[in-house]
Image (cartoon, rainbow, N blue to C red):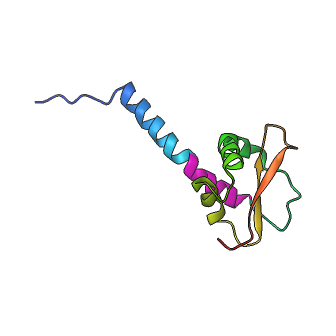
Amino acid sequence: MTSRKKPGTAFWTTVIVVVALVCYPLSFGPACWATAQSGPLVNPPCGWMCIYLPLSHYIREEKPENCALGRWVRLGLPRGHCVALPFKYDPLLWYTVGNNDGV
């Protein structure tokens, strides 16, 4: 009989890291679409959106129209809707990304 070695800790750590690096940015678009509001925004971003603060900062620095992540967010926003993205951990500091051109 041959003995099979079970995957070790290093293997599972690698799997978790790779999945996190792929799923984290991909989940940002659907999270934004789920929290989108129509018309001008009057509500700050949802509290749980702070987990996306690094991605939010990236979009703010690169301009939503110019980066792939910003286009990913705008892809699923219905026309005339906007999403509030956190700017800092302060709930009063936020900015918007909108879809007014039907992209």
**Rendering coords of residue 48 (x, y %):** 73, 44
Q: Is residue 7 left or right of residue 71?
A: left
Q: Main secondary structure of the magenta part?
A: helix
Report the span colored magenta: 25-35
Q: Image quadrant of residue 78?
A: bottom right
Q: Is residue 36 above or below residue 87?
A: below
* Residue occupying the point 69% across, 53% down: 63
Q: Is residue 70 left or right of residue 47?
A: left
Q: Image quadrant of residue 97?
A: bottom right
Task: Name the residue furthest top.
Answer: 9
Residue 32: say if magenta.
yes
**Rendering coords of residue 89 (x, y %):** 79, 37
Front residue of 61/97: it is 61
* Residue occupying the point 41% across, 37% down: 15
Q: Is residue 91 left or right of residue 83?
A: right
Residue 34: say if magenta.
yes
Locate the N terminus and report the quarter of the image it occupies.
top left
Q: Image quadrant of residue 10?
A: top left
Locate the C terminus and report the quarter of the image it occupies.
bottom right
Q: Is residue 33 above or below residue 3?
A: below
**Rendering coords of residue 31 (x, y %):** 66, 54
* Residue occupying the point 43% across, 30% down: 13
Q: Is residue 77 above or below residue 94?
A: below
**Rendering coords of residue 69 (x, y %):** 60, 53
Front residue of 93/3: it is 93
